[in-house]
Amino acid sequence: QFVLTQPPSVSAAPGQKVTISCSGSSSNIGNNYVSWYQQLPGTAPKLLIYENNQRPSGIPDRFSGSKSGTSATLDITGLQSGDEADYYCGSWDTSLNAGRVFGGGTKLTVL
Amino acid sequence: QVQLVESGGGFVKPGGSLRLSCVASGFSFSNYYMSWIRQAPGKGLEWISFISSTSPYTNYADSVKGRFTISRDNAKNSLYLQMNTLRAEDTAVYYCARDRSGVPFDYWGRGTLVTVSS
């Protein structure tokens, strides 16, 4: 259903590191930038990472992104209870109907 | 500061129409692409349309193509989404978001809820 594939959920204890994966294809991640968004409960999404690994001003360096081939990852270190949220990856897709695409989202639980 | 405020959501019967608006402030609206993104209850994000900054270049997701029309009025710093032939599966919170190459969706509105039900 979603063009990009993410695990439905991940969890880790406070202070630990968590990695969220995002898998796509050559028509999206393989040849385009990846962005990541955080959606806290009941709020609009917020941009965390753009151009694969760039952080907007105000985003702490505990959040980092990377891309390799047709996959991308979001790493969150020093987990805090406030990081508990849904995380979405996004990219541009150049298949038949070019447009923006998202992953299905990953629910992060801080144990 | 950048602000995006959506309005126009509500309750509509299947087959009906609604027009959503998004008023922008705090940046030069006419210089940016804009997008609409929706989120069905308890579901993930779905990009549905974008419009270029000044020229009338638009694109749509297959799920809304032919039913929805995106437009903008740069003089009013406003973005619109005309939604026709609405279906139950169009029920969602609709967000407008600033969109630019390399930095997609760097600002979002708070969203407006559209409910399609008989």
Image (tube, coloured by chain):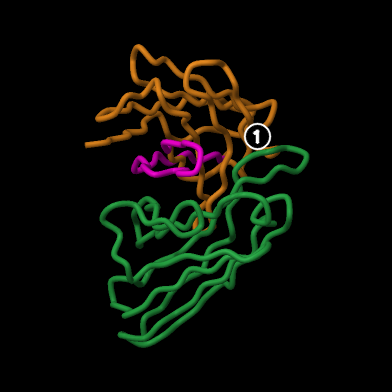
Q: Magenta stretch: dominant SS?
A: strand
Looking at this view, is A83 or B82 the one in front? A83
User: x and y percent of residue A61 in the render?
Assistant: 32, 67
Question: Which residue is at a point 51% across and 33% down the rendered structure image?
Answer: B12
Looking at this view, is A8 or B17 the one in front? A8
Q: Which residues are magenta?
A: B97-117
Q: Is residue B100 magenta?
A: yes
* Numbered marks: total: 1
Secondary structure state at the residue bearing disc 1: loop
Looking at this view, is B77 or B7 the one in front? B77
User: x and y percent of residue A83 in the render?
Assistant: 33, 71
Question: Which residue is at a point 73% across and 55% down the rendered structure image?
Answer: A26
Answer with left or right where residue A31 lies relative to residue A47.
right
**Residue most toward the left?**
B1
Residue B116 position (above or below residue A75): above
Question: Which residue is at a point 46% across and 23% down the rendered structure image?
Answer: B80
According to the picture, the residue beneath numbered tag 1 turns out to be: B64
User: x and y percent of residue A7 in the render?
Assistant: 59, 73
Residue A56 position (above or below residue B63): below
User: x and y percent of residue A95 in the render?
Assistant: 75, 43
Q: Quadrant of residue B49?
A: top right
Looking at this view, is A101 or B39 the one in front? A101
Q: Chain of mark 1?
A: B
Colour chain B is painted in: orange
Residue type marked 1 = Val
- Using a 10 Å C-alpha cutoff, classify the residue at mark 1 as few (fewer than 14 neighbours), some (14 to 19) or many (20 or more): some
Q: Which chain is green?
A: A
Q: Quadrant of residue A58?
A: bottom left
**Residue most toward the top?**
B75
